Amino acid sequence: MKQSIDDLDRKILRLLQHDALISLEEIARLTGSSKTPVWTRIKKMRENGVIRKTTVIVDPKKTGFDACFFVLVKTSEHDADWQARFLNSLNARPEVQEAHRLAGEIDYILKVRVADAVAYDKFYQSLIAEVKIFNVTALLSMEEIKSTTALPV
């Protein structure tokens, strides 16, 4: 069910996206509301799936995941069985942070976070051993210029 989002909901979402640990009191103060309506709105947005989960963003460099690869995947297989195996393979690999099916010449793009090129090669070798892939191109990110999970609500 799609929930309509009003200006107060948007203000609450912006604050929570910036810092999910912000107190109800602070949200109420910054939005010009009170605690109970803020709590009710957050609860409703959770129930309706607008807020999917609360999580922590970990610095990859400080935890040993220095290399970020964008992996372009072309396949000659498009049947449901191949897609299910590919999806299962990606879901089994925590180093795959994102996976998108694309329109155009490239079928999929993956964001893969690993320690280094050797770790990427291990990932690559295990992926192609499980799933037939026509072509794989890996692009190493030299510098992360902007990264956010926040939506422009």
Image: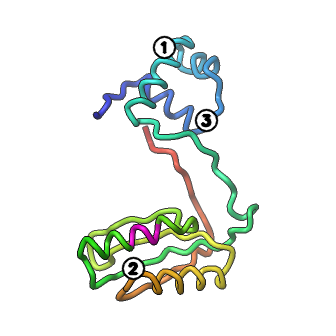
Residue 25 in picture, x, y percent from top left: 63, 17
Q: Which residue is mark 1?
A: 37
Residue 152 in picture, x, y percent from top left: 44, 42
Q: SS class of the residue under badge 1?
A: helix
Amino acid type at circle 1 is Pro
Q: SS class of the residue under badge 3?
A: loop
Q: Residues within 10 Å of mark 2 (few under 14, many from 20)?
A: some
First along the sequence among labels 2 and 3 = 3
The residue sitting at 40% across, 81% down in the picture is 131
* Above or below: residue 94 compared with residue 129: above
Between the C-alphas of marks 2 and 1, the distance is 47 Å
Residue 140 in picture, x, y percent from top left: 57, 78
The residue sitting at 23% across, 75% down in the picture is 79
First along the sequence among labels 3 and 1 = 3
What secondary structure predominates along the stretch shown in magenta? Answer: helix
Amino acid type at circle 2 is Val
Amino acid type at circle 3 is Ala
Q: Which mark is residue 73?
A: 2
Q: Which mark is residue 20?
A: 3
The N terminus, quarter of image: top left
Q: Which mark is residue 137?
A: none
Q: Residue furthest right?
A: 62
Asked if residue 66 lies left or right of residue 11, the reply is right
Q: Do labels 2 and 1 touch, CB within 8 Å?
A: no
